[in-house]
Amino acid sequence: MRGGGGAAGEGGGGGVRAVAEAGPASGGITLTLTGTHLAQATAVLVGAAPAGFTVVSDSHIVVDAPPGTPGPLDVTVTTPGGISSPVIYNRVGAPGI
């Protein structure tokens, strides 16, 4: 998944990147985000929805993808240094019968 440039935390740093490009609209999966200064994360938004997250290290957090309407969403991480540039996560609807 493509990540944007820009500060992800104090002192600048690289852009946040996500490992998974897409997941079900029903949620229930974990997104892995990598970047710099992530240990100081105070919030993660998937679209406009706050998402639960766990800091694994200064360069790695995991995010609980919330359910919602299918389509592309910006994922951003907020730290004391600012808000990261968004990465795109696509919610995919259930296949039709």
Image (spheres, rainbow, N blue to C red):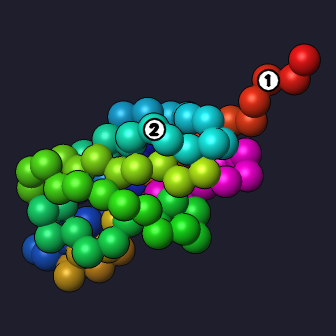
The amino acid type found where label 2 is placed reads Ile
**Residue 29: x and y, percent?**
45, 38
Residue 81 position (above or below residue 5): below
Magenta part, dominant SS? strand
Pick whichever, 83 or 28, lies toward us: 28
- Asked if residue 52 can be seen in this view, the reply is yes
- Crowd tier of the residue under label 2, counting other residues whose Cα lies within 10 Å: few below 14, some 14–19, many 20 or above: some
**In the visual, does 74 lie left or right of 44?**
right
**Residue 6: x and y, percent?**
31, 65
In the image, residue 74 lies in the stretch drawn in magenta: yes
Quadrant, the N terminus: top left
- Who's the residue at 48% across and 49% down the image? 65
SS for callout 2: loop
Q: Which residue is mark 1?
A: 95
Quadrant, the C terminus: top right
**Residue 4: x and y, percent?**
40, 54
- Who's the residue at 73% across and 45% down the image? 70
SS for callout 1: loop
The amino acid type found where label 1 is placed reads Pro
Q: Quadrant of residue 13?
A: bottom left
**In the visual, does 45 lie left or right of 14?**
right
| Magenta residue span | 68-75
In the rendered image, the residue lying farthest to the right is: 97
**Residue 47: x and y, percent?**
57, 63
Pick whichever, 41 or 81, lies toward us: 41
**In the visual, does 1 lie left or right of 19?**
right
- Who's the residue at 61% across and 35% down the image? 24
Pick whichever, 60 or 97, lies toward us: 97
Q: Which residue is mark 2?
A: 29
- Crowd tier of the residue under label 1, counting other residues whose Cα lies within 10 Å: few below 14, some 14–19, many 20 or above: few
Tell me the distance, in whole angstroms, between the alpha carbons under discs 2 and 1. Answer: 17 Å
Residue 24 position (above or below residue 60): above
